[in-house]
Amino acid sequence: MAKGYWISTGTIHTPLAMVPYISRLTDWLPTVGAKFLIRDVNCDVREGSPGSLNVIIEFPSLEAAVSAYESTDYQSMIALRTPHSDLTLTISEELVA
């Protein structure tokens, strides 16, 4: 089964204010079968202007990634993040050849 991914890019404006979000997210991800693959706050941007943050989180499937995003738990975490950052979050499925 193809894995699912959250791919997030952007800018964090007040890093210390993001600690509650990051802490909750880090504790919560294993409960939904997910893990960080990439968490880089100083990425080397060569083209475009996606911000200095890159995060990729892996889920067991696309369905698990969508379900986790739509969960009450994660929806409550969004309010912790949005006042302190400008981030994009896309959900993608692994390419299985």
Image: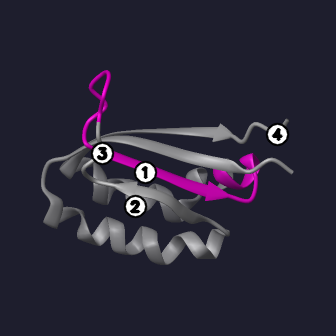
Which span is picked out in magenta?
Answer: 45-65
At a point 65% along the width and 52% down the height, the residue shown is 65
Tell me residue 88's x, y (percent): 39, 37
Q: Give the Cα distance between marks 1 and 4.
A: 21 Å
- Whether tag 2 and tag 1 are in contact, CB under 8 A, the answer is no
Q: Position of residue 86 (x, y in %)?
A: 26, 39
Q: Mark 1 points at which residue?
A: 55
From the image, state whether disc 3 or disc 1 is nearer to you.
3
* Neighbours of disc 1 within 10 Å: few (<14), some (14-19), many (20+): some
> Mark 4 is on which residue type?
Val
Residue in the image at 59% along x and 51% along y = 70
Q: Is residue 39 left or right of residue 59?
A: left
Q: Which mark is residue 12?
A: none
- Quarter residue 48 falls in: top left
| Location of residue 62 with respect to 57 vertically, above or below | above
Which numbered circle lies on residue 96? 4
Mark 2 or mark 3: whose residue is earlier in sequence:
3
Quick one: SS at disc 3?
loop
Q: Name the residue under label 2.
A: 77
**How far apart are labels 2 and 1 at the CA level?**
16 Å
Which of the two residues, 67 or 38, is positioned nearer the viewer here?
A: 38
Badge 4 density bin: few <14, some 14–19, many ≥20, Cα 10 Å? few
Near-viewer residue (24 or 12)? 12
Name the residue type under label 1.
Answer: Val
Of labels 2 and 1, earlier in sequence is: 1
